[in-house]
Image (spheres, helix red, strand yellow):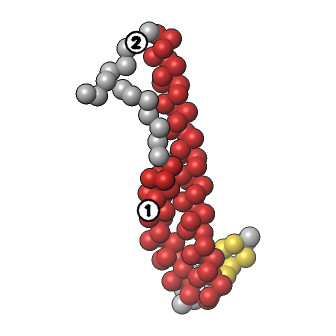
Amino acid sequence: MERTHYSFKRLFLAYLFGYMPFGLLAAILSLVHILPVHFNERPYYGVTGFLIAVLTIPFFGLIFSVLNWVYLNFGSFVYRCVLKVLKIEEKRND
């Protein structure tokens, strides 16, 4: 197994497009005054709620991708260290 680095860009795009339908649904429901968007414990409807919901889409993508990227790379680092301590040869993908 070669040294694995997880691509932040791919994680960000995966979380961005994964959350986008839910963010857009919340934005549309807020725009038509069906369901408010809560921001700082205040409900927002209409255009303000729509803009808040749309602007949270990249924010959630960024937060989740940063946390997941750190988690995966740290786990990969610990895995390599354990293999080194136990002197187990890493399998190569040839």
Residue at 58 percent across and 47 percent down: it is 67
Q: Is residue 68 above or below residue 52?
A: above
- Would residue 44 be seen by someone viewing this image from the given angle? yes
Q: Is residue 56 above or below residue 27?
A: above
Residue marked by disc 1: 18
Q: Please give left or right for residue 49 compared with residue 88 in the image.
A: right
**The N terminus - image quarter:** top left
Identify the element where label 2 is drawn. loop
Residue at 47 percent across and 38 percent down: it is 5
* Near-viewer residue (58 or 8): 8
* Residue neighbourhood size for the residue with mark 2, other residues' Cα within 10 Å, grouped as few (<14), some (14–19), many (≥20): few
Residue at 44 percent across and 29 percent down: it is 3
Q: Position of residue 69 (x, y in %)?
A: 53, 44
Q: Position of residue 91 (x, y in %)?
A: 32, 21
**The C terminus - image quarter:** top left
* Residue neighbourhood size for the residue with mark 1, other residues' Cα within 10 Å, grouped as few (<14), some (14–19), many (≥20): few
Give how far apart the Cα atoms at labels 2 and 1 are: 37 Å
Q: Position of residue 63 (x, y in %)?
A: 60, 55
Identify the element where label 1 is drawn. helix
Mark nearest the camera among 2 and 1 is: 2
Q: Is residue 88 above or below residue 75?
A: above
* Near-viewer residue (30 or 61): 61
Instruction: In the displayed orientation, state which residue is furthest to the front.
Output: 94
Residue marked by disc 2: 88
The label shown at residue 40 is none
- Would residue 37 be seen by someone viewing this image from the given angle? no
**Which residue type carries mark 2?**
Ile
**Which residue type carries mark 1?**
Gly
- Which comes sooner in the sequence, label 2 or label 1? 1
Residue at 60 percent across and 69 percent down: it is 56
